[in-house]
Amino acid sequence: MTHSLSPVRILIFFTALALPALFILPYLQVNLLPAEPNTELQIRIQVPNTPPFGVERSTVSQLENALSAIRGLKNIRSESRYAEGSIYLEFGRKEDMAARRFEVATVLRSIYPKLPTGASYPTLSGGNDVAQEDKGPSLLYTVEGPGDVAAVRQRCETFFRQVLHQVEQVSNLEFQGGQEERMVIEFDPQLLKIHQVDPHELEQVLHRANGSYFPGSSEDAWGRKLFVRSIPADISLSTIENTLIKTEGGYPLRIKSVARVYQDRETPSSYYRINGKNAVSVFVFLSPDCNKVYEAVRIQQLITRAAAQQQDLHVRLAEDKTTFVRVELQKSWLRASASLLILLLLLLLTYRNWRLVLILLFCLMINLAITVLTSWAFQVEWHTYTLAGLSVAFGLMIDNAIVMLDAYRRRLNRRIFTALLAATLTTAAALLLVFFLPIEEQRNLVDFSIIIVISLISSLFTVLFLVPACYDLWIGAPALKSSNALKVAQKRRIFFRLAVYKSAIEFFSRWRLLFYVAGVLLFGLPVFLLPLETQSRQWHLQWLNSPNFQREVRPHLEFWLGGTLRLFVDTFNAESYYRQAEATALYVRAELPHGHTLAQMNTLMHHFERFLSQQNGLEVFGTSVNSGQYGDIEIHFTSDAEKTSLPLSLQARLQELAQGFSGVQWSIYGKGEGFSNNLFMDNQASSRLILRGYDYQELGRQAEKLGQLLAQNMRVQSIELDQNLNYFDRPLPEMYLSLDASKVAARHTNTGDLLNALNQMASPISFSLSSEKTSSEGLIKAQNTAQFDVYHLLHDPLSPSPKSNLHIQELGKMELRQSSSSIQRENRQYLRLVTFDYVGSYDLARQLNEQVIRKMNREMPLGYSVEGEQGSVSAATKRQFYLLLILLALNFFICAILFERLRQPFFILLTVPISFIGVFLSFAWGEFTFDQGGFAAFVMLGGIVVNAAIFIINDLNNAKGQVHNFQNTLIKVLYRRSGTILLTIVSTICGFVPFLYEGPETPFWFALAIGTIGGLMASILAVFLVLPVLLWKKKKLL
């Protein structure tokens, strides 16, 4: 080694390179889940008194035509409802959303003058990146105190704003509960008519008499203009009552002459309660770009200290949404620490030399520091998937260091680095395949893969320079261990084992064809993918339609030829492929028919709150009632109760309680580890089919044909031909008033005057007044507004003008109708949703869907199609497995470049399918859920299993000049490499062991760990049995 690359200089260089990572660590923002790029813009527009079809034709279609030419637009869809429309623009992930937003705003500004008269100006929103856990409040407090709830709310708002006003990370505060008092002016319509006063005049005179205004201005000595502002000192009920409206015949007409003024509490428009108590609820929202875990703890400390000084105000933390994030991050750090500890113990037990272990541990720490520094420089997002990737990288980085250390000790210098480079490239190629996945499926895997690739690249530099430098500095020059040092008994045992091993390889090589057939059958042939029927008229495919083949022959073929692949596919459930780590929660949703009031729904929710308040093991439950149609209860459990059967038993008891309320549609379901997607599944599957076409009327006729086709199946029930894609956007009953134009004209009025008169009777007017002391909210309404129903609308006298007095029933009629369904389009095609229930398993329902879709697509006109809404899940999983073929091709080219041969890379690739057998058996025998972590296990194995085969063939090629007997040389190479290979496999397995601790309910991590461990164990068979058989009986090196 030259003086310029002395061990001391190399050691100092890498140490100095790693030190900045210590200063970066405190500034790393770690989230629970990766940020979800929001590349969608939403446009909303109001078109008063226009049905959905008119909104779509006159407004939405014009906007779509203008917006469809915007650069980078990936998808455009629209929804037209009564009196309003929405357009959603989806752009590519790499698009500059600020520029696209500006371009959309420019188009809206230019197209607005061409829209129909009365249409509102389009509003534009969206386009920001938000982490998945950043979509709601982080902290929830409940506040109780003496007096009524409204007074407590006023004190509560003052308290929280004073405590948190200097915390920049708090983006918003919301308060619920405690309706405030307001001023109500209740006028007599007959008196207003007598005095010829319009209700809006009352609002105008209030603002003139009690509002602020600027009577003038003046200049000071420096020439600055100062404006004078006049504002009332105070506003009371007497001030409002004595407000002058006008003067009639010399007499003043004041508000108290035509209306009654009093204080009243606001009518609640919604209810939100914590644990069934009518306390004030405070929602604390944090900025998306802050460290929420740290800020939540800091805010809690501030509020706790401030609340201790409030003697009669009880502030309690009801829910901390960051607790789950904190626990998951702690689990990730514990996994990483456990992986490191297990690897350290493994190295100590293997080498039994603390200096060698110190070299490996020091190199690992330097690798980790360089990885953190590089990820910070390239702005890699840190979350639980990143930490998991770092835990996995521990084993891979240790593997590279072990291989180099073993080679350097044997006086092979750094010649093994070429093989290490190829092995690292195969692993990196496998991990970077995630960029070939669809955008929505890359979310969890991108940072997981990137952090491992960065770790592997940094490990190449450390094993090339740092490992030899540390060895030279701390141990000394490598010394070749003499074979004579082994005792005679040890040599005999080694020779005996090698002879037995060689005999086994010779035996399998002699029956190589049977060995290959057994390997193929063990992996499995996909005969179970043969279609149940075929529409082809070719004679050699007609046997698929034979009932005897399907009933008698096919089951035996699937059993004997399917192998482990069949076992895996039988347990695979595409519906559970996408899972996320979620806190255990139980949800109760009640739905009442249209026409029920908010108070009725609130009373219904009280029954469930009283039941839940008597249960143990509940951390918190929140009730939300937003309308008379929908009410929700969200139930969270304590950490101890989550691990018991309480979530499932409570779900069953709530379902039993719900059966006692007739006329209510209930939905009671759970999420998180306390609930399993595979339990309590009924024998009825709901299916949704989406029709697409360019003509709305023709699309309706095609939907009718589809309904007739489905009705032919006896298991199909409840067919709906025009369902809305949005669950909450459903046709509702509405009262429709039709007026006779001739009768309206005969009464010397018009529709506009009638509508204004009706609004005065039914719609109150809100106003706001400010004084030096307070700010008052108020309401102007007619007497008996609450009792103004359909009967009074038709029979009460109405005065659209001072000189007219009429009844609505004389001008038209009112009838009950269903509101029009919304019209939805995607990429200029109309959408129609057809739903039905299938009495049977999901597999049978899926097969029926596929048959119906094939038949309809053959018969539908050009430009029309039908597809299954849920079919994208299975299609996406199939597309992912096709990527494994790309991975094998990349590995083949990398190995071909390294060895400059074509047959050896092919032998290396054959070890990958053998390792997949371990994955198949792990999920099939263990009956574990296969999710995205399982696919990540396939990707990982495709990159790391070939490493051992690369090292063996690389050593075999390097021994070219020493070969006298190829078979003996192969056995010797396998023996010399066996220790290093087994150690690297075991170290990688140890890196995944901590992921098994949480159990099969943990999404992603458990499937990743169990799949990778099973595949690595099977790779031992692939490397030490399959690969030697493939290479056996070669007279010369390949």
Image: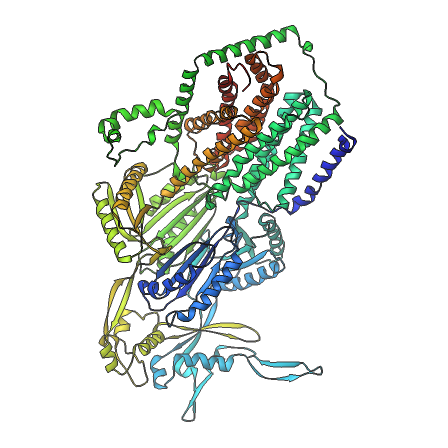
Is 704 in front, or is 262? Answer: 704
Residue at 69%, 10% in the rendered image? 485
- The spot of residue 86 in percent (x, y) is 40, 60
Residue 898 or 177: which is nearer the viewer? 898
**Which quadrant is home to the C terminus?**
top right
Q: Quadrant of the N terminus?
A: top right
How many badges with numbers are in the image? 0
Decide: is 8 above or below 271.
Answer: above
Q: Is residue 860 visible?
A: yes
Is 832 situated above or below 923?
below
Asked if one can make out residue 660 in the rendered structure from this viewpoint, the answer is no
Scheme of colours in the image: rainbow
Residue 474, percent across and down?
Answer: 75, 26
Residue 725 spot, x, y in % from top left = 35, 52
Residue lying farthest to the bottom in this orientation = 250
- Left or right, residue 149 beside residue 53: right
Residue in the picture at 71% in, 39% down: 17
In percent of the image, x 29 and y 64: which residue is there? 734
Above or below, 338 relative to 785: above
Q: Nearer the viewer, residue 209 or 391?
A: 391
Q: Position of residue 57 (x, y in %)?
A: 33, 64
On screen, 167 above or below 430?
below
Q: Image check: 582 left or right of 381? A: left
Q: Quick one: 686 or 539, which is closer to the camera?
A: 539
